[in-house]
Structures are given as structure tokens and as C-alpha cells.
Amino acid sequence: MNNLIQQYKESLKTARKMYRSATDEDKKVIAGMISDLEFAIEWMETGRCPENRRGIERRAAYQREKLFDPLLMQKYFRSNEPVYEWDDHEKESIITSWDKQRIEDALSVLTEREKEVYLMSRGYCLTYSEIANYLCISSSSVQTMIERAEKKIQKRISESLFCMCS
């Protein structure tokens, strides 16, 4: 990567020399080349797009962190729960006993209603409005329950030695 950056910097120097002796018409084209080279060099040096205000490491927690692997959660729910009228998936039993115990431990802090809503959202991938329709509640209530459940699960995971290992 350092070699590539060095080549781009050399090309930038060459483009700047050409800009000084170019005609007005050529200066427009060369200025665009210089701008593109500077953009690419900054991107390679910093590891992020220069136009973005924040890198991925500065995103909000809800944008970058997942409590569990979503596919693992779906397998867990589909292997344990009874078949619901709104669920057209088959039961899955491909989940290790360790993963099952970890998930059950983390979910043990939820109320029955929170667990039901969390199951529908994360296990069966239903939208908030679909869940709200099935349970005859508002979408904002569903969102609040999901947020509350995720906070409880996160707290349980951070406090539990059982859940810390992956």
C-alpha cells in the first residue's frame, strides 16, 4: 500500500508541474486530475472516504453492534419455539448446545411480552408494523419493547461470564 501511495504522490507532483505550464483550457483538466489524486491519496492514508464526516469507528452503537449473530438468533428461535400461524418457516435444529445456553441466559432477563416481541423481530424478521398488527399494539410500542429488550440483553451479556465467551 505504501508503494501505491508513493506512486500516487509522484503522479501528483508531475500533474502540478504540468499545471504550471499548461494553457487555460488544459488547466481545467489537470486541476480535475490533481483533485482526484489528492482525494485518492487522502483516502489511502486515512483509510476512509475524505468526504465522510465520520468513520465507521465513530458510528452510533446501534449502527455497528449486534448482540448476537442474526442468523444464530433465527436458528435458535426456529428450533425452540412452537410453530405460529404467521410463521411459514420449518423448524431448524442446527444450533450447538453452548450457543443455545448462551442465548437462553441472555434472554432470561426479558419479560414474556418483551421476549415475544423480540422473537418476532429478531427471530422471524418481522417488521415493527407486522408485529404491531399481530399483537394489536402500536409500532412505537414495538420499537420501545425492542429497545428495552436489547438494553437488557446487552447488560446481561456484559455482566455474565456465561455469555462473554464466543
Image (cartoon, rainbow, N blue to C red):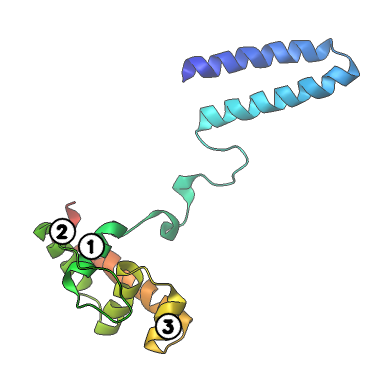
Q: Residue 95 carries which label?
A: 2
Q: Are marks 1 and 2 in contact (CB under 8 Å)?
A: yes
The count of marks equals: 3
Q: Residues within 10 Å of mark 1 (few under 14, many from 20)?
A: some
| Quarter holding residue 104 | bottom left
| Quarter holding residue 103 | bottom left
Q: Residues under labels 2 and 3: Cα distance?
A: 29 Å
Residue 140 position in % (x across, y down): 47, 80
As drawn, which residue projects farthest toward the bottom?
136
Residue bearing the label numbered 1:
75
Secondary structure under tag 1 reads: helix
Residue ID at (33%, 74%):
120
Q: What residue type is labelled 3?
A: Ala
From the viewer's perspective, is residue 162 above or below residue 132?
above
Residue ID at (36%, 71%):
121
In this rendered view, identify the residue nearer to me: 27 or 93. Answer: 93
